[in-house]
Amino acid sequence: MRDESKMSHELKARGKFRHTNESPVVGDRVIFDEKFITEILERKNILNRPPLANIDQAIIINSCVEPDFSFNLLDRFLLLIEHESIIPIIVVTKTDLMDKEKLDKLKNKIKYYKKYYHVIYTSTVTLEGTNEFKELFRDKISIFAGQTGAGKSSLLNVLDTKLNLKTDAISKALGRGKHTTRHSQMYELFGGLVADTPGFSKLDFFDIKEEDVPDCFIDFFELSNECKFRGCKHLDEPKCKVKKELELGNVLPERYYDYKLIMEEIRTTKPMYRK
Ligand SMILES: Nc1nc2c(ncn2[C@@H]2O[C@H](COP(=O)(O)OP(=O)(O)OP(=O)(O)O)[C@@H](O)[C@H]2O)c(=O)[nH]1
Ligand SMILES: [Mg+2]
Ligand SMILES: [Zn+2]
């Protein structure tokens, strides 16, 4: 029997999509005839930049060096992903490029995230961590997201040597101001579908409202039951449990700092850019 799910079809989107705001994106489930996509089925979620739909989990790729690890970028990715109810998995790549002492310091901070998320350390040189992916993708749609040059395509290449995705040294990639991976594409890997995506160095939050942010920081969300005020934004409110735990050293200071920056950024972004 033929396995219909594995057949590929080259299709165009019907003209009608041009008159609506909708167009098919990577990850969409669609109805089609011989030539055309005629309908896009309801999406369980959608990311806009880059456009991807129906994602179960996002593998957030952060390099420890080249480019340097950034808590700010990690927290921004986590917000975007939590906001779409996608499960985030944190990956820290290029462990072979950082000396042990520095790496231990970094791991000590990242330990904070382990209470809430699956964290994997990897290297395409020592192959550290690569086995952990073998059961991660089964029956799911996963995306690799992260800054340009962080090593998304390189990691996919070691997970499946048949992929042969293009990769490039970051000095060249960043110098040209271009991304090595130019568009999102899905591949079959370990019983699931995995999308490689182009990296981006800035993330914006035009689709996120200020009042949505506290619940998307799941560590703060857990504490918020014990804030004095319902709907506490953990900024200037008295008797705030998040600020209390921050003072006690139980909330990572970098994390709280990023939270404040993001809240401020969303509050001051001009409404004309907002949905
Ligand atoms: N030493 C070392 N180098 C790595 C590792 N992972 C990636 N690199 C290098 O980092 C550079 C960038 O890797 P890519 O895989 O192209 O990065 P990317 O995230 O796909 O970048 P974009 O496609 O531009 O988004 C390449 O020169 C890789 O060889 C690693 O674990 N160790
Ligand atoms: Mg790439
Ligand atoms: Zn609070």
Image (cartoon, rainbow, N blue to C red):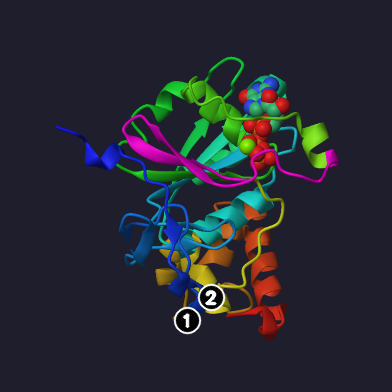
The front one of 266 and 169 is 169
Q: Sort mark 2 into few (<14), some (14-19) or many (20+) by Cα contacts within 10 Å.
A: some
Question: Residue at the bottom extreme?
Answer: 271
Comparing labels 1 and 2, the label whose residue is closer to the camera: 1
Residue 178 shown in magenta = yes
| Figure quarter occupied by ligand 1 | top right
* SS state under label 1: loop
The numbered dot on residue 229 is 1
Q: Please report the residue visible at 54 percent of the width from the left and 17 percent of the height from the top.
A: 127
Question: Residue at the right extreme?
Answer: 175
Mark 2 close to ligand 3, CB under 8 Å: no
Q: Quadrant of residue 53?
A: bottom left
Q: How many marks?
A: 2
| Span shown in magenta | 175-198
Q: Amino acid at mark 2?
A: Lys
Q: Sort mark 1 into few (<14), some (14-19) or many (20+) by Cα contacts within 10 Å.
A: some
Residue 263, position in %: x, y?
Answer: 64, 71
Residue 228 shown in magenta = no
The residue that label 2 is drawn on is 239
Point out the tag, 1 or 2, that comes first from the N-terminus.
1
Residue 139, position in %: x, y?
Answer: 29, 40
- Residue 82 in the image: above or below residue 93: below
Q: Amino acid at mark 1?
A: Phe
Residue 262, position in %: x, y?
Answer: 66, 67
Query: Which quadrant is the C terminus positioned in?
Result: bottom right
Mark 1 close to ligand 3, CB under 8 Å: yes
Side (left or right) of 110 relative to 65: left
The front one of 67 and 139 is 139
* SS state under label 2: loop
Q: Please report the residue visible at 66 percent of the width from the left and 48 percent of the height from the top.
A: 71
User: Marks 1 and 2, how far apart in space?
Assistant: 8 Å
Residue 21, position in %: x, y?
Answer: 50, 75
